Amino acid sequence: MADLQFEDENNSYTYKSRVILGQGESPKMVLALVKWGLVKNEKQAGNILLTVSVCFLVATAIIIYSNFIRYRPAQSSSKVDKYLQSYEEGGVYVNQQ
């Protein structure tokens, strides 16, 4: 039987980019977090980046909800609105000043 050796999975966790020309490298954001000393290894950096991405996604959903769904514009009495309302009712809009 062939001799198989496995690396320790806890210590060898790394992100590698796709190899196009030469050897793949870790993403620059991961390397920057490790370089700045914010995290100890690449696995922690990946977890931090994933958490930040989810937070931005939630913040985006809240902003969209608060701007487009929760606050609806008040009824205005402009001529265009009156025309559209009469058109929907099947009538003809008569400009009364």
Image (cartoon, rainbow, N blue to C red):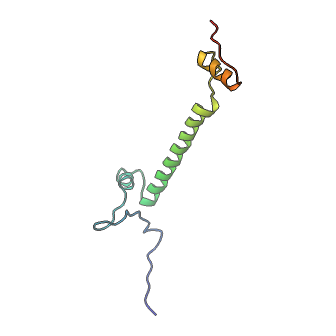
Q: Is residue 4 left or right of residue 80?
A: left
Picture layout, residue 28 above or below residue 23:
above
Outermost right residue: 89
Q: Is residue 28 left or right of residue 60?
A: left
Q: Position of residue 8 (x, y in %)?
A: 46, 74
Foreground residue among 68 and 18: 68
Picture layout, residue 53 above or below residue 83:
below
Outermost top residue: 97
Residue at left offset 68%, top offset 21%: 86
Foreground residue among 81 and 28: 81
Q: Position of residue 9 (x, y in %)?
A: 47, 71
Foreground residue among 12 and 59: 59
Q: Position of residue 31 (x, y in %)?
A: 36, 55
Outermost bottom residue: 1
State the image quarter where residue 23 is shown.
Answer: bottom left
Total number of numbered labels?
A: 0
Picture layout, residue 55 above or below residue 35:
above
Foreground residue among 32 and 73: 73
Residue at left offset 37%, top offset 64%: 18
Q: Position of residue 72 (x, y in %)?
A: 63, 27
Q: Which quadrant does the C terminus fall into?
A: top right
Residue at left offset 46%, top offset 51%: 49
Picture layout, residue 57 above or below residue 90:
below
Residue at left offset 56%, top offset 43%: 58
Q: Is residue 37 left or right of residue 87?
A: left
